[in-house]
């Protein structure tokens, strides 16, 4: 079984290594994602959004609704972590083993 | 697709750092080595031409190291 | 963090880092439109400043934000983002359509820039307070009752 997994991993790695040469160059203007909507953003971003940084313009102006839910998700994640970590019940040892009261509340 | 030599060296270095983090028995050393992972990723992001992501990665790498070390005060340092 | 840790060398070195970190955070917030950066990075840098001062001085640090305040302020930061959307909604436009901000400025993209700045302030407050929150709850996890006071 381990040999089969090793052979499978080797085949998959070889396929990745052979197919990665067909990828386009970094920053090539003739590829599909650089021809669809990127020239519009780059040419019209300053006069539309008023920010010289194109990344800020795209993140907050063109895609503002995404960033709003991103912020909400991060706020909810932090709130959930605080609720879980500061509750007295969840994840602690049960109370009915009082042999070692010094270490009873230290999470190991 | 072309990969520069220094990019290839950094990518191999990422894999080595990850293996070191996995097999390290000292959790404090693992946290510090993991900050090295994030700084190597910062260099890679700079080479790919995205300084925004690199900046975020640098700051978050620092903060996550602080978190790891702070939570190590509560648990054992050596993993069993 | 109840009591400080580290010796005198660590305390002095970290104490030098705090004002630079906070000033750099405000710079990144204000110049996020012109240079790499933005709300997320600025909030993380400000949180680093607050965490360092809390590590040096313990509970009685000058730059201290306790747990309840940070929970409330994270919600305020998220509210500030959606508040801009509501303002444009009541101004007659769609949700988050910055052409309908209540303050009229002459070139149209100036209103966009102002809305982007308000939104970045909101994101900054949310990220900073969330990170302080996480640190507070991790630190107080193993203490007596574990509740945020």
Image (cartoon, coloured by chain):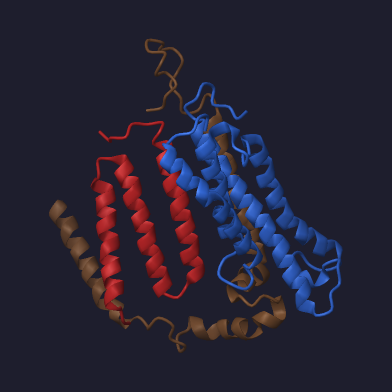
* Letter of the chain shown red in the rendering: B
- Looking at the image, residue C32 sits to the left or right of residue C84; the answer is left
Say if residue A77 shows up in the picture.
no
Chain seen in blue: C
State the residue in front, C35 or B7: C35
Does C116 appear above or below C146? below
| Front residue of this view, candidates A9 and C105 | C105
Residue positioned 17% across, 58% down in the render = A6
User: What is the number of callouts on the image?
Assistant: 0
Q: Residue furthest top?
A: A99
Instruction: Answer whether residue B33 is visible to the viewer in this image.
Output: yes
Q: Which chain can be seen in brown?
A: A
Residue, far left: A3
- Where residue B72 appears, as percent x and y from the top left, is 39, 36
Q: x%, y% of residue A28? A: 43, 86
* C76 left or right, relative to C103: left
Residue C106, picture quadrant: bottom right
Q: Position of residue C147 (x, y in %)?
A: 58, 27
Q: Position of residue B21 (x, y in %)?
A: 29, 49
């Amino acid at each position: 079984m381990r040999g089969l997994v090793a052979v499978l991993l080797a085949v998959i790695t070889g396929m990745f290594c052979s197919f990665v040469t067909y990828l386009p160059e970094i920053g090539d203007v003739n590829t599909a994602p650089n021809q669809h909507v990127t020239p519009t953003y780059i040419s019209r971003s300053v006069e539309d959004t008023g920010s010289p940084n194109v990344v800020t313009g795209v993140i907050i102006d063109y895609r503002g609704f995404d960033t709003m839910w991103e912020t909400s998700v991060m706020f909810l994640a932090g709130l959930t972590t605080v609720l879980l970590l500061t509750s007295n019940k969840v994840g602690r040892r049960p109370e009915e083993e009082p042999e070692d009261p010094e270490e009873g509340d230290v999470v190991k | 697709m072309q990969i520069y030599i220094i990019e290839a060296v950094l990518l191999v270095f990422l894999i080595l750092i990850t293996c070191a983090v996995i097999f390290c028995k000292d959790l404090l050393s693992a946290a510090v080595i993991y900050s090295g992972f994030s700084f190597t990723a910062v260099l890679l992001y700079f080479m790919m031409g995205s300084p925004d992501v690199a900046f975020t990665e640098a700051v978050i790498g620092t903060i996550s190291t602080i978190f790891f070390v702070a939570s190590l005060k509560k648990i054992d340092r050596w993993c069993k | 963090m109840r009591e400080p840790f580290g010796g005198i060398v660590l305390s002095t070195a970290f104490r030098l880092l705090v004002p630079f970190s906070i000033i750099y955070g405000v710079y990144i917030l204000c110049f996020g439109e012109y240079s790499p950066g933005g709300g997320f990075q600025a909030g993380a840098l400000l949180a680093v400043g607050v965490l360092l001062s809390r590590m040096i001085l313990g509970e009685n640090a000058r730059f201290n934000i306790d747990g309840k305040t940070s929970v409330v302020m994270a919600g305020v930061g998220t509210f500030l983002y959606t508040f801009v959307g509501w303002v444009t909604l009541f101004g007659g436009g769609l949700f988050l359509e910055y052409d309908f901000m209540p303050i009229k400025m002459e070139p149209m993209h100036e209103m966009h820039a102002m809305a982007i700045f308000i939104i970045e302030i909101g994101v900054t407050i949310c990220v900073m307070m969330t990170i302080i929150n996480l640190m507070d709850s991790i630190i107080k996890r193993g203490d007596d009752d574990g509740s945020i006071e």
